[in-house]
Image (cartoon, rainbow, N blue to C red):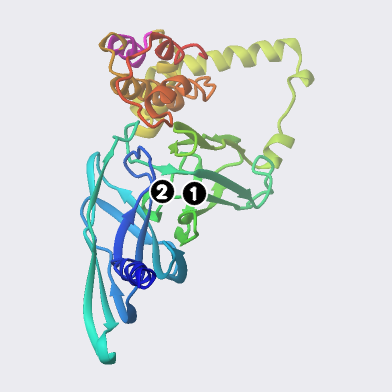
Amino acid sequence: MVIRIVAFLVLLLGGARADDLRLVVPQMQPVVGEMIPVTLRGEYTSRIALETLTFPGSDQYDWMQLARDQWRDEEIDGRTVRVFERRLAVFPRQAGPLTLGPVTHHLTVVGANNLREPLDMTAQPITLPVAPFPAEGAPLSARKLEIEDTLSDAPGALRDGETLVRRITLKAQGALPHQLPPRPSMRQPWLISFAAPERRETQPTPEGPATSITWEWHLRPKTGEPGVLPAVSIPWFDTAARQMRTVEIAAIPFGYASFRDNRSGVGSLSAGQVGIALFVFAIGVAAGYVVAFSGLSRRRREDIVRQLRRLSPFDPTKQGVKRVMRTGDLLIIRRAAERYLNRRRELCLPMSGRETTLLDTLLYQRAENTQGFEANAAAAREIFRHE
């Protein structure tokens, strides 16, 4: 009799396991725009006939589903349980507390006497903190970012009248299409440029969305005179290394091969001819400087100003970094450093790409409890070490 009572109690307790639905988020410290993997998991003992579930939208985040819903049987606490899983990717739009949920799974279950009954399971909301994006401008966070740059021919040795086709594809792992940057400018005073419509594509994968954007230009010089298309830098936050990085669309030389082949060498001129040519050139340059700004386009004037800024020994953004170093606020120092590095990128000044490595480590290192960091003077000085 005692054995029967014990067996009855075991069966009774085993059958008392309740259905459950919850949101599962890994331990992480996301920044604005970073992908947060979210799993909606349900564990059901009821017999389910029908089900429907919609993840709620919000002004706080963008989201997408990464794969089809999964249903499978699992052994949990000695019982066979029907498990439901939906994998999502959430992208916070702003800094501060981010709330996900509640989420309701509407079920139709088979009850007593095979009658169907409605059953709503609700996953309680969860809240996690989101840090500001560690740079100015539109946030771009990804696990990996790559650039493919293809040219239809050698850009510095085109045939007369030939048009160069340049196609650039930017590939990001763990980013949405609208988070990728707009098409960069490929315009110069000496260049005729036609841009084809851009293509943005996204493919869901178990690790997150794989997004690509393709830009294409048809480029032809107005004259055969050589020129250079400048480089374009794209800053982004590496979610794997937890630091800012930069990818670059490379600068390319541009011009017709015939212009180079038809140039006359100064070696064939006499010393007197060379002297006269240099004198005339000097007079022309002097006269040109007198009327330069009155006849130049705004873009050309900006190029001249940029060159003067490169030669200037005074850098206000560098002084700004040194000024905020005394505040001890690492986030303020990081933003000032980004302004300083952006200026160097604009002026094509030498950079190593590792100026903020130590500073980003202090701000975004992976740890369970990474709070209360004090500003480190060595991290700030590292910004200027690679000038």
* Residue 116 drawn at (x, y percent): 25, 87
Q: Tell whether 52 sits left or right of 150.
A: left
Judge depth for marks 2 and 1 and give the one in front. 1
* Residue 61 drawn at (x, y percent): 27, 52
Q: Can residue 304 be seen in this snapshot?
A: no
Q: Residues within 10 Å of mark 2 (few under 14, many from 20)?
A: many
Q: Residue at x 38, y 12 (%)?
A: 376
Q: Which mark is residue 180?
A: 2
Q: Quadrant of residue 379?
A: top left
Element type at mark 2: loop
Q: Tell whether 91 sits left or right of 206.
A: left
Q: Are circles 2 and 1 on residues that touch, CB within 8 Å?
A: yes
Q: Is residue 320 magenta?
A: yes
User: Who is closer to the viewer here, 260 or 379?
Assistant: 379
Mark 2 vs mark 1: which is more N-terminal?
1
Mark 2 belongs to which amino acid?
Leu
Q: Start and end of the magenta stretch? A: 314-324
Residue placed under numbered mark 1 in the picture = 172
